[in-house]
Image: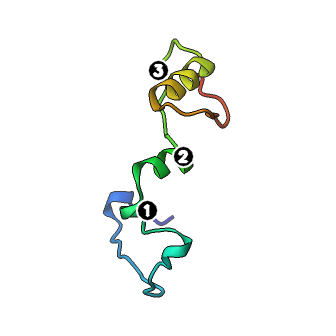
Amino acid sequence: MPRSVAPWQVKREIIFKAEDETDMKHGCKPEERPAQQHIRYGIINLDKPAGPTSHEVAAWVKRILGIQNVGHGGTLEA
């Protein structure tokens, strides 16, 4: 049976299928996107500690970021 290679031992390279320019009427480059758009359309990957409920953590995120809508996918319970 062939031995598996650890992920950090795999040689990786970036492959570009095509170079292209972003048409500014459709948006902007991710590195030039304003923070407000990242907050509005982004995802927060959260490692919830034991103790607070998923509902409490979602409420904290709403208050901290000052946004109206927050949700979570699946369970955040430990």
Say which label, 1 or 3, has the lower sequence index: 1
Q: Residue at x 42, y 69 (%)?
A: 29
In the rendered image, which quarter contains the C terminus? top right
Q: In whole angstroms, how far apart are the C-alphas of marks 2 and 1?
A: 44 Å
Q: Secondary structure at mark 2?
A: helix
Instruction: Quadrant for residue 72, please give it.
Output: top right
Crowding at label 3, few (<14), some or many (≥20) Cα neighbours within 10 Å? Answer: few
What is the three-letter code of the residue carrying label 1? Arg
Q: Is residue 69 left or right of residue 17?
A: right
Q: Mark 3 and mark 1 in contact (Cβ < 8 Å)?
A: no
Q: Is residue 39 left or right of residue 35?
A: right
Q: Mark 2 and mark 3 in contact (Cβ < 8 Å)?
A: no
Name the outermost residue toward the front: 25
What is the three-letter code of the residue carrying label 3? Pro
x and y, in percent, of residue 17 in the image: 48, 86
x and y, in percent, of residue 57 in the image: 54, 22
Residue placed under numbered mark 1 in the picture? 3
Q: Residue at x 37, y 76 (%)?
A: 14
Q: In whole angstroms, how far apart are the C-alphas of marks 3 and 2?
A: 24 Å
Residue placed under numbered mark 3 in the picture? 49
5 or 8: nearer the viewer: 8
Q: In whole angstroms, how far apart are the C-alphas of marks 1 and 3?
A: 36 Å
Name the outermost residue toward the right: 74
Say which label, 2 or 1, has the lower sequence index: 1
What is the three-letter code of the residue carrying label 2? Arg
53 or 61: nearer the viewer: 61
Crowding at label 1, few (<14), some or many (≥20) Cα neighbours within 10 Å? Answer: few
Q: Secondary structure at mark 3?
A: loop
Q: Which mark is residue 27?
A: none
Compared with 40, 23 (above or below) is: below
76 or 34: nearer the viewer: 34
Residue placed under numbered mark 2 in the picture? 40
